[in-house]
Amino acid sequence: MSGSGGSEVRTPIFSGENYEFWRIKMITIFKSYGLWALVEKGITISESKKKEVAEETSAEEDDEKMVAILMKDAKALGIIQNSVSDQIFPRIASVD
């Protein structure tokens, strides 16, 4: 990464072999982005909370937090999707 000037981390590609090595590398990547807790625990947003945030016009702070969490979730999902081979991708394509 030295000298690259970017913050993009190159993810290892999982092709169906050496899962343990791939898993360890992926955990390190997620930790470096501050995403590991999100990946490990997931996010749970109740339907009532979604409705509450959508209905409240004064809930701007809650909206910002929700957007930040959803953006982190999307980033983690993108990292996972980009780190599997084309043969593995169909197995995970419908998972959020």
Image (tube, grey):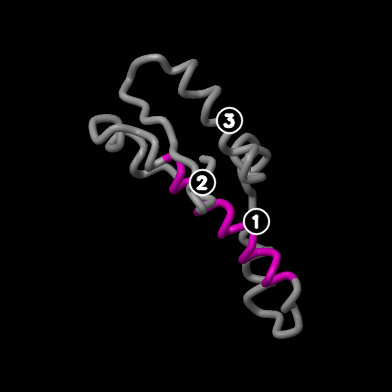
**How far apart are labels 2 and 3 at the CA level?**
24 Å
Q: Which residue is tagged 3?
A: 27
Proximity of marks 1 and 2: CB atoms separated by less than 8 Å: no
Please give the label number shown on residue 82. none
- Residue flagged by tag 1: what amino acid is it? Ser
Spatial CA distance of label 1 from label 3 is: 27 Å
Tell me the mark number nearer the camera, choosing from 1 and 3.
Answer: 3
Residue at position x 46%, y 43% in the image: 79
Pick whichever of labels 1 and 2 is earlier in the sequence.
Answer: 2
Instruction: Between residue 80 and residue 90, name the one nearer to us.
Output: 80
Q: CA distance from mark 1 to mark 2?
A: 44 Å
Between circles 2 and 3, the one closer to the viewer is: 2
Q: Are marks 2 and 3 in contact (CB under 8 Å)?
A: no
Disc 1, disc 3: CB below 8 Å? no
**For this view, does 16 lie left or right of residue 68?**
left
Residue position marked by numbered label 2 in the rendering: 3
Q: Nearer the viewer, residue 90 or 84?
A: 84
Q: Amino acid at mark 3?
A: Ile
- Outermost residue, front direction? 3
Considering only order in the chain, which callout, 3 or 2, is on the residue closer to the N terminus? 2
Is 9 positioned to the left or the right of 36 in the image? left
The magenta span reads 62-80
Q: Mark 1 sits on what residue?
A: 46
- Magenta residues: mostly which secondary structure? helix
Residue found 51% across the figure and 40% down from its top: 1
